[in-house]
Amino acid sequence: MMRQYELVERVLKYDPKADEALLNRAYVYAMKAHGHQKRASGAPYFSHPLEVAAILTDLKLDDATIATALLHDVIEDTDATRTEIDQMFGPEIGSLVDGLTKIKRLDLVSKKAEQAENFRKLLIAISSDIRVLLVKLADRLHNMRTLEHMRPESRRRNSEETLDIYAPLAGMMGMQALREELEDHAFRWLHPEAYDALTEKLAEMRERNRGLVEEIRQAIARKCDDAGIKAETFGREKKPYAIWSKMKHKQISLEQLSDIYGFRVIVSSIEDCYRVLGIVHTTWSTVPGRFKDYISAPKRNNYQSIHTTVYGPRHQRVELQIRTSDMQHIAEFGIAAHALYKDQQHGLVNGHEFEAGIDVDDSPYGRLRVMISSLLEAANPEEFLEHTKLELFHDQVFCFTPKGRLIALPRGATPLDFAYAVHTDIGNEATAAYINGRHVPIDTHLRNGDEVVIETSKGHIRPAAWEAFAVTGRARAAIRRAAREAERRRFIELGRQLVNSTLAGLEVDYSEEKVKAAAPKIGFKTADDLLAAVGRNDIPLQDVVGAILPQGQAPGDEGYKPTRRFGRARDQEGWFNIEKVNSLKFRTAEIDSTTAVSIGGPSQELPVAFEPGGAVPGDRIVGVMAPGEGIRVFQIHSPRLKEYEEEHWIDVTWDVDPERPQRFPARISVTAVNAPGSLAEIAKVIGETGGNIDNIKMARRAADFTVMHIELEVFDLVHLNHIVAGLRAKSAVAKVERLFE
C-alpha cells in the first residue's frame, strides 16, 4: 500500500505548487474514517481510495482531484458527513465527494426504465464538474482490476455497467488507454470462454511470429532515419476486446484478421507526420480504403492522428498511426491532458476549469455537456437512454457547410442530423437538402467530405416520418421536442376554436381573459392547459362553457338555451341539409359557419387528420373528436362514420384561402385497358390537369383490364371532377370512380 509521503511526492513531481497540507490531511482523514474496514479480497478498504488516487496521479491531475479520490467513499461507507467534509476540506471538494456518493448509489443495470433514470442522474452529476467523471472512471478501473474477489453476480453487473456506460464515456473523453483496460477487464468476466480462447490463440501467434513486430518496427525506423526525421516507433498487439469486437463485426476468424499488430510513429511536428506518411506510401503498397486523416479533421474527443495500412515487410499488412508527441499525450489521457483545475491562471469558464487556449465548447467535455443538455429534454427515461447510447457508440463522418465549417457526425447521419448539428433552429426549419450541389432526399446518408446545404422555411411543419431519418440523439431529441410543442399548439388552437364557436352559438363573445379566469375553477393552471385539454377531448366542453358563463347561462342553469353543437339534423334534407356550397365553405339552415370549426389543409395549425379516402373542399364533411388525437375529417358518405357515437361528432366547415391553394387527399379507382402505355396516359392526364399522384396500387389485374387505386392530391372538388372527366375521356380507361375507404 502506498505510503503518505509517496503519494505527495508523486503529485509534487508534476505539480510543484500542489497543496501538500491538503493531500496529507485527506490521506490521514480517509485512513482513519475507513479504519478497520476490509474489502472482499481481505485488503484494508483504504487501499482502494489510495489506488484510485494513484491512477489519477498517472493522469497528472490537480491536488483537489487527488484529495477527492482519497475521500470519495467516506460519506457512503463511514460516519463522515458532507458538512464535515466541507468544513475540513472546503465546499469545492465537498461538492465533488457528494457527487461521487450519489453516483455510487445508482443501479445502472436494473430494469430499463429505472436504469435509464439512474443514467440520467449519473450524467447530471458528471455535467456539474468533469472531475467527478475522472474520479469515477479511476474508481471503476480499480474495481475492475480486483473483480476476481467479487461474487459472480457482482462481476457480471459491474462488467455490464463498464461496457455499457463507463468505457464509452472514457472513449468520449478521449482516454483511450483507460477505455481499453476497462473493456478488457469486462470482456474477461462477461465472456470468459471467448477471452481465454482468444488470449491463448494470441499467445500462439505471438510465439509463431516471434521477431516479426520488431522487424517491422525497425524497418519503419530506418526509413525515417534515412529521411532525417527524428521519430520514435512502437509496435504493439491489439487488445483482446478490440480484436474480438472486430471479429464479431466482420464475422471472421482470428486467422482472417490481418491487422492484429499496430505500429505508432511519434514525431515532433505536424509537417513530419505528413513526411512520414509520404515515405511509408512510397515504400510499401497501400491497402485501399484504409487511410484516415484525423489531424486535419479531429475526432469529437479531440483525437488527432494519421491512420494508414500498408503491405509492409514479409508482405504483412501493417496498420500505422502517425502523430506528434502532443497528439500522443492527448490520445492516451484525453480530457485529463487539459485538466489543470486549481490554479486560476489556467482559466475558469462558467465554473469549469480548462487550460488557457482550450475551447471549452469544442472540447470533449463541452460536447458532453451539450449532449447532456439536449438529452435531458427527452420525453421519458427510455428515450433518454436510447439517445445517449446513440451518441456514445457511433463512429464519425466529417462534412462541411458552404463556408467551410467542419461538422463531425456519427456514421450513417443524414442531412437532418447535419442541420441540427449546425443549429437547432436550422434543424427545426429544414425543408430540403443539397449535397455537393445536388438536391437529395432528407434521409440520404452523408459521406466524408460532403458539402451540405440546408434549405429552411419558417413555420415549416415537418412530416412525421422525418424523425426516423435522424441518427444523432441531439436531432431526435430536438425533433420530438418540436413535435410535442407543435402538437400542443395545435390542440390549444383547436380548443380555442371549439370554445369560441360554442360561445358564439350562445351569442357570447370569446376572450382569453374569460378562459384564463375559468381555468382554476376546473383544475387547470393556465388558459393554454385548459384549451389543450379541450382540444384533446380530455374534458367535456360543457364543463368549460359552464365555468366561463355567468350564473343562469351555464348548462344546467335555469334559462340556459343550448345551440346544437353536436349530432345529426335528422328532420332536414340529408344529414346536414347542405343548402349551398359557395367556393370552399358551406352552411346549413341551422348551423352558421361562425359556430363550426374551420378546416384548412393537412398542414394547418390544427390537429386534423383525413380518414382513408380523404376529403376535398366542396365535399360535404363531418368531424369526429377522437380523444387525444384531435379531429378526424370524414366525407359525409363515408361508411365508417357509423362506428362513432354521435356525441363525438362536430360541425366543421372548409376555410381555405383561394390566394394560397393547398392540396387535399382523395382516392380514385381506375379500370384501364391492360396495354402498354395505359399507365403513362393516365399519369399524363393527372399531371397536365395539375394533380399530384401520391401512391398507386394495382388492386386487380387480369389479361384484358387492370384496376388501379390511385391516391391523389387535388385542390378541391372541381379540380378532382376535372381529373375524373379527363380520365373518362381516354379510350384506354373503362371506368373511374371515387373511393371513400
Image (cartoon, rainbow, N blue to C red):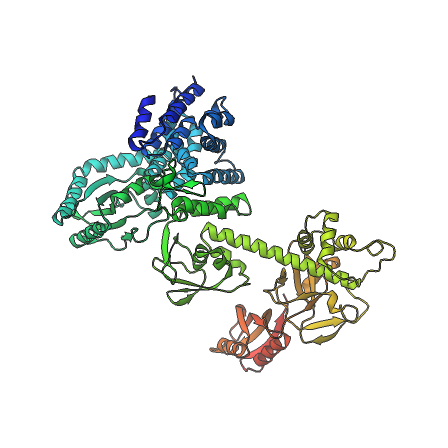
* Residue positioned most to the front: 345
Q: Is residue 404 left or right of residue 121?
A: left
Compared with 81, 729 (above or below) is below
* Residue positioned most to the top: 36
Position of the N terminus, as image quadrant, is top left
* Residue positioned most to the right: 558
Position of the C terminus, as image quadrant, is bottom right
Q: Nearer the viewer, residue 46 or 572?
A: 46
Residue 132: tell me if it is visible. Answer: yes
Residue at 62% x, 55% y is 488
Residue 1: tell me if it is visible. Answer: no
Q: Position of residue 308 (x, y in %)?
A: 25, 50
Residue at 38% x, 46% y is 363
Q: Is residue 29 left or right of residue 313?
A: right
Residue at 31% x, 24% y is 6
Q: Total number of numbered labels? A: 0
Compared with 326, 437 (above or below) is below
Picture quadrant of residue 421: bottom left
Q: Position of residue 517 (x, y in %)?
A: 74, 52
Q: Is residue 741 left or right of residue 127?
A: right
Q: Position of residue 464 (x, y in %)?
A: 54, 58
Q: Position of residue 736 (x, y in %)?
A: 60, 76
Q: Nearer the viewer, residue 629 or 300?
A: 300
Compared with 245, 583 (above or below) is below
Picture quadrant of residue 635: bottom right
